[in-house]
Image: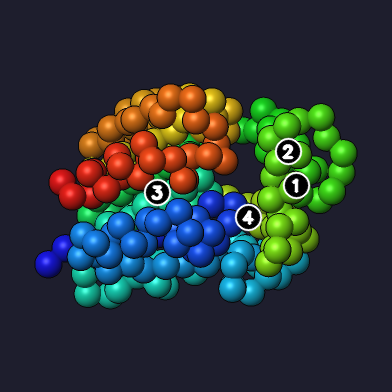
Amino acid sequence: MSAPVLLVHGFASSFQREWVQPGWVDLLADEGREVIGVDMLGHGDAAKPHDPAAYSALEDDVAAHLPADEAVDAIGFSMGARVVLTLAARDPARFGRIVAGGVGGRLLAGGDDGQGLAIVDGVEGRESDDPLAQAFGRFARSPGNDPEALAACLRRTHPELGDAQLEKIVNPVLIVAGDRDPLAGDPAVLAAAMPNGTAKLLRNVDHLATASDFGFIDAALKFLSG
């Protein structure tokens, strides 16, 4: 019997928006896969605290959804991809195959080039000339979202995820990003930091379009099927 699949959404999204609406859950069900759906803290139906410190255990909150007696495959997008990779670095045995979308070489950059701060400005409603910040600002104010909680989530202290952590992920990992995604960077750079990482670059796809892009969905499903 195939392993369950953990699905972890991106920032300002939810299990329903990221995975149910674009058809991921139905497609996985067609393949006989049980889905473990998660709404991360500050998102979807989860609690929405306004204190950044409340988000310090975000990875632990997601790990609490994992079964105790079997490994799972996992698909994470953007922030969710980082969370999945962080958990896999801590305990690779809890995972089988992993797909990380909307991330790439920038995850290894070790600092903020200003894009992240611009997105915080957009989410908190400050004017910005950055198109991506404007898009995330609109996204943060879509029905069901709490912009103050999302801003607190962005301002949390992230656990370290660099070369030393990524090299512990011995699982097969597929990194997928669009060639028009300034938040991700080159997926091949991130894949190369892991012993069994591979990469796929989506043509003419930006960050916010990645999760529902058929190229991503097709590549992920084929990868999980082994």
Specify the quadrant of the image occupied by residue 68. Answer: bottom left
Give the CA separation, mark 4 to mark 2: 12 Å
Q: Position of residue 201 (x, y in %)?
A: 39, 27
What residue lies at 21% left-to-right and 69% top-to-bottom? 70
Give the CA separation, mark 3 to mark 4: 19 Å
Count of all numbered marks drawn on residues in the image: 4
Instruction: Using residue 130 as the reference point, say whether residue 70 is left or right of it.
Output: left
Cβ atoms under marks 1 and 3 closer than 8 Å:
no
Give the CA separation, mark 1 to mark 2: 6 Å
Camera-nearest label, 1 or 3 = 1
SS state under label 1: helix
Give the CA separation, mark 1 to mark 3: 26 Å
Q: Earlier in the sequence, mark 3 or mark 4?
A: 4
Give the CA separation, mark 2 to mark 3: 25 Å
Instruction: Using residue 127 as the reference point, say whether residue 182 is left or right of it.
Output: left
Residue hosting label 2: 133
> What amino acid is found at the position of numbered circle 2 in the picture?
Ala
What residue lies at 67% left-to-right and 28% top-to-bottom? 113
SS state under label 3: helix
Residue 85 circle label: 3
Residue hosting label 4: 12
Camera-nearest label, 2 or 3 = 2
> What amino acid is found at the position of numbered circle 3 in the picture?
Leu
Towards the viewer: 43 or 116? 43
SS state under label 4: loop
